[in-house]
Amino acid sequence: MPWDILHTRIMWCLNSAALQRIQEWMFSGKNFHYFVVLNVLRSLLRNSYKYHSVFDSLNYLENLKLGIDAVGQAGGVIEGVVCYTGDVSDPNKGMYTLEYYLEFVRQLVDEGIHVLAIKDMAGLLKPESAKMLVSAIRAEHFDLPIHVHTHDTAGTGVSSMLAAAHAGADVVDAATDDALSGLTSQPSLGALVASTAGTDLDTGIALEEASALNEYWEECRGLYAPFESGQKSGSADVYIHEMPGGQYTNLLYQSTQLGLTGQWSQVKKAYASANRLLGDIIKVTPSSKVTGDLAQFMVANNLTEQEVIDKGDTLSFPKSVVEYFQGYLGIPPFGFPEPLRTHVTKGQLIEGTTLTCFEGRPGADLPPMDLSLTKQVLEEKWGLAGQHQIRDVDVMSYAMYPAVFDDYLEHARQHGNLAYLDTRTFLTGMKVGEELSVNIEEGKQLIIKLISVGEPNADGIVNIQFEVNGQPRMAHIKDKTVGGDVQSRPKALKGVQGSIGAPMPGVVLETKVSKGDTIEIGDSLLVLSAMKMETVVSSPVKGIVNKVIVTAGDQVDAGDLVVEVEEN
């Protein structure tokens, strides 16, 4: 379980005298009741996790107050975070001025934070900007510890972190040099160690010792090479599109999976357009996902920035975009842009309410969660079946991410605890004739040998022969790549509003209408999902449903006909 992995990592950090990794809780992306947040933090403190970094993806103070207060009540160390975007060194660069950040830091200090973090997820903090921002904060708050985090997408990370340190930052983040640093990761640890050696900022770390870590991580990174994006060098155009480092590589992969291969440059340009359409927001998970979803939606549908505004009341936007404009994440620093917000939220009621938009912290009116009842429900579903003993920390996991929790236990029920496998075997599988030693508990070892892999039969079933501690075994596995004819679907007719097509490729999660239903403009027809991006397809016309072409589980491409509506 995730809590067990977390506890193991904490014990490793403590036993190795390494700095304890800061835990960041992204409550802003979820509507949590204070009671849930407080209990999660208490569980963490019982597991030796005492340092908590509290941030909000929109710098929405009301969301931050919740996390700050909960960490304080739980007895933890509070690191308050200001998320960075724009460029304080350029007076013509938008609304995020030096005074904006100074005022925000003042508000965090008033809330009682112990440490301040500057979170620059897109790597936009240039050396001069770092100097200006950190020195201005230090001038006002001489005894406040300052921690700076950046990404090295443009290649200026080392220079920026040195500038921040000279300006008064106490901690800057870095990544193990060569193997894991640079590009969309953090700046090089070795470069910072070498650059400060013998100066007032000397880290006390020997370069030889820092470099020794590189040998281990170089080998480790090789195991995950198939999952890398293929990015070869830094990219200064990050100052134009402002895409966070962690999202840059993920979005590149997602765009390929969504059928946008060869259109990465258009996606980056659309990302900048999407940011403007959303109101020039700070882009950190989950607000960065909203921006990325909108960018991919625009490219997939060949939409310009102006066309999104003009057609906003008829487009089927990704669910994350609709929820952003409804206020699920909170309120951005300079408000929501109109008339786009009104167009996007028209007829889109927030589930369980009569509201189209929240007007404050979205979770403020949630009722307290009954943790005892929730534990009982989970025990009936998972624990009593002998699959898993439900603990208090599991209830906390379910409270935050119910679908992820259920998916994890369903996977564990089918496949067991795969944490016992080594990384290479988990990622690539065994070869015929290969023997594997697996330690499943203290003094208990399994010797597994793969004997043969058969050919799939007519139903796609493959017979796997293997040995466990010398005893022959056989398993029957479904080869998902076999069988099933590719279905060709009709395309929606261009220029005919009642011929409604899929706005994005994906899988149909749910259909919300049936033949004969009377619908209005904006009514939900079905829900699509692709690469963690959900899209509610809405009707651009009023009329009667003539035909529903798809059902739940169907795979569709962009433009495929999904529903026909007879206009009236």
Image (cartoon, rainbow, N blue to C red):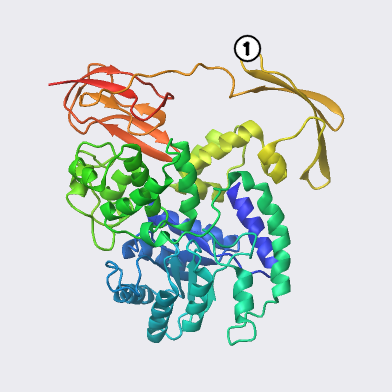
Residue 10, percent from left and from top: 63, 61
Q: Which residue occupies the foreground of this view, 389 or 329?
A: 329
Query: Which residue of the protein is positioned furthest toward the right in this rendering?
Result: 470
Which residue is depicted at the point 44% across and 65% down?
Answer: 120
Which residue is depicted at the point 19% across and 39% down?
Answer: 313
Residue 358, percent from left and from top: 25, 51
Q: What is the secondary structure assignment of the residue under circle 1?
A: loop
Above-or-below relation of 431 to 254: above
Q: Which residue occupies the foreground of this view, 286 or 86?
A: 86
Residue at the disc numbered 1:
458
Q: Amino acid at mark 1?
A: Ala
The answer, for residue 355, to whether it is visible in the render is no
For the residue carrying disc 1, how many other residues have a C-alpha within 10 Å: few (<14), some (14-19), or many (20+)? few
Q: Which residue occupies the foreground of this view, 17 or 535?
A: 535
Above-or-below relation of 438 to 182: above
Above-or-below relation of 533 to 244: above
Locate residue 128 relative to residue 41 in the image: left or right.
left
Residue 6, percent from left and from top: 61, 55
> How many discs appear?
1
Tell me which corner region of the image, top left, top right, bottom left or bottom right, holds residue 82.
bottom left
Residue 442, percent from left and from top: 80, 48
The answer, for residue 509, to whether it is visible in the render is yes
Which residue is depicted at the point 28% across and 19% down?
Answer: 514
Look at the image and tell me in which quarter the C terminus lies.
Answer: top left
Locate residue 390 relative to residue 261 in the image: left or right.
right
Query: Which residue of the protein is positioned furthest toward the left in this rendering?
Result: 568
Tell me which corner region of the image, top left, top right, bottom left or bottom right, holds residue 80.
bottom left
Which residue is depicted at the point 43% across and 35% down?
Answer: 259
Tell me which corner region of the image, top left, top right, bottom left or bottom right, holds residue 334.
bottom left
